[in-house]
Amino acid sequence: MGVAVARSGRLASLGDPLQFALDRLAPKLAGRGPRGYSVRVVSRDTRSSARGAREAVEELVRQENAVIVVTLAGTEVLPAVADACEAAGVPCLSSAFPWQVYYYGRGADDDRPFDWTYHFCWGLDDIADVFADLWERVDGSGPHQPVGCLWNDGPQGRWSRHPERGFAPVARARGHRLVEPEPYREPATTLDAHINAFRDAGVDIVTSAATGRDLALFRAQTAEKGRRPRLITCSRWLAYPPSVTRSGELPPQAGVGTLAYWTRVHPYRSSIDGMTAAELAETYEQTTGRQALQPLGLAYALLEVASHALTTADDPTDRRSIAAALGRTRVHTMAGLLDWTRGPVPNIATVPLAGGQWQPGTRHDYELVIVTPGRVGGLPATGDLVTT
């Protein structure tokens, strides 16, 4: 089993959960191999770049003879790993990237799926539903209030505003009017055009998939003009703890909501060692001295699903057989039930989302509070939305 993980470069700290899961589970996976086999797990550093990702896959396949490759996160890195695996004819499993961007953005369509690459994640439509739940909790806001869209010109911004497959059609179906200025070039230097458009439309709620840096710029320039949105909903970097993303860019405070896909209170359990989400978060923090990250649950699930495919494949040495096993996988994991047999499209299993907000905590400076359980069955709300 090959693991492409960022251990250097700008994504290195976000590679920590996958490295932790690898260190913890690799010895256990060795003993869970198919009859007559043991599983050897090897990793390569993607160096947080598309080029490094491609080179990592090449080394894993050619030097280590990996029969399956797993990877996690990175707007440029993850597609590069998946594309390299597709070209090399080796099964790939990935997560932490909206599935529409992964699937349609890499050139597949409903009638022409990928041959080798599989993915599990939420969709942009799921983000829209969860964010609409948050918008509708703003005091005094009805279901038809205008929502300003701070979209960039990258793949997440482009697919978010797609008229059929993105974020926008779901938000509109919920009754919200979207105010969509022209997308800005990332990284942004000024966002005056967006601020003025939002002011003219009477926008009090803004949504985005911006980086922390660009969102901080928006907030600073908005404040200079004497305005402050009551709520900003943003995915991407804000799904991580402020201790990871803080660099003077975006101090967390009231008025920002994000998505919650895995926390210590999620009702999930590992298929390999029976560990609960709460136990995994505690073990990570006790072992590393760092706050548990949301991708930790996805990282654990990556290795669970890869192990499941190897042990259920008709021939665990044959890559085509392993790819077929991935396509028929349905298994309960640390990220919940993952089911490739029901879509929404071939190669994809979905992860349900809840709505969250970083608020001052008791164990850490800021902790992710569950404001709305969204589509996660059995998940308790642990706090109320705080707006400005």
Image: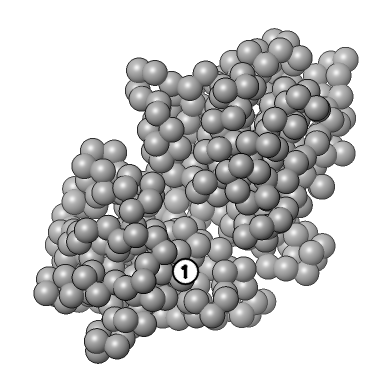
Comparing 173 with 191, the one in front is 191
Q: Is the N terminus in the top left, top right, bottom left or bottom right quadrant?
A: top right
- Residue 40: quarter of image: top right
Picture coordinates of residue 126 (x, y %)? 37, 47
Q: Looking at the image, which residue sits at the far top?
A: 314
* Residue drawn at 22 percent across, 46 percent down: 169
Comparing 294 with 189, the one in front is 189
Comparing 229 with 331, the one in front is 229
> Which residue is identified by label 1?
212
Q: Does the rendering let one see residue 335? A: no
Q: Does the rendering let one see residue 155? A: yes
Disc 1 is placed on an element classified as helix
- Residue 109: quarter of image: top left
Q: Looking at the image, which residue sits at the far left?
A: 200
Q: Looking at the picture, does residue 124 appear above or below residue 383?
A: above
Picture coordinates of residue 329 (x, y %)? 58, 24
Q: Looking at the picture, does residue 198 appear above or below residue 6?
A: below
Please state if 20 lies on the left or on the right of 357 as rendered: right
Q: Looking at the picture, does residue 115 appear above or below residue 357?
A: above
Picture coordinates of residue 287 (x, y %)? 82, 62
**What's the residue type where badge 1 is placed?**
Gly
